[in-house]
Image (cartoon, rainbow, N blue to C red):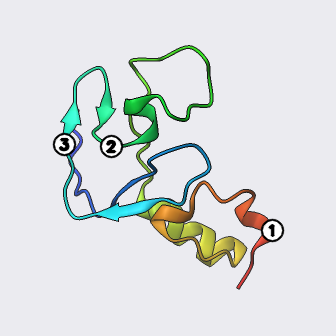
Amino acid sequence: MQWQGELLDINVAPKASAPMEALSEARLVAGVGLQGDRYATRLGTYSKNHHIDRQVTLIEVEVLEALARDRNVELAPREHRLGNPLSRTR
């Protein structure tokens, strides 16, 4: 089975708890992550142990569409880190 998709949004945060910044392009460094992102620079992580298998998070646009349709939650791609999205309805 082969999967194919299109990358629609690239968002990084320069440090922990910083707002996500949208990018038109990014450099992905193998074993490190997205250049300039808090995980790549280790300026903000959710774990003290660096994990080479956790450099990016991919969120299907269908998931964001389902949240809006089924839960009345409008969530932009860069808003996925803003706490509990189910507490914010339209």
What residue is disc 1 on? 87
Instruction: Give the structural element (helix, strand or loop) at label 3.
Output: loop
The quadrant where residue 55 appears: top left
Q: Nearer the viewer, mark 3 or mark 2?
A: 2
Farthest residue, direction right:
87
Give coordinates of residue 3: x percent, y percent. Answer: 24, 41
Mark 1 crowdedness (10 Å alpha carbons): few <14, some 14-19, many ≥20: few
Mark 2 crowdedness (10 Å alpha carbons): few <14, some 14-19, many ≥20: some
Q: Left or right of 33: which side holds 29?
A: left
Give the residue at x 39% y 38%: 56
Farthest residue, direction top:
49
Q: Earlier in the sequence, mark 1 or mark 3?
A: 3
What residue is disc 3 on? 27
Give the residue at x 56% y 54%: 18
The quadrant where residue 61 appears: bottom left
Give coordinates of residue 31: x percent, y percent. Answer: 29, 20
Mark sitting on residue 36 = 2
Amino acid at the residue labelled 1 = Ser
The answer to whether marks 2 and 1 mark residues whose Cβ atoms lie closer than 8 Å is no
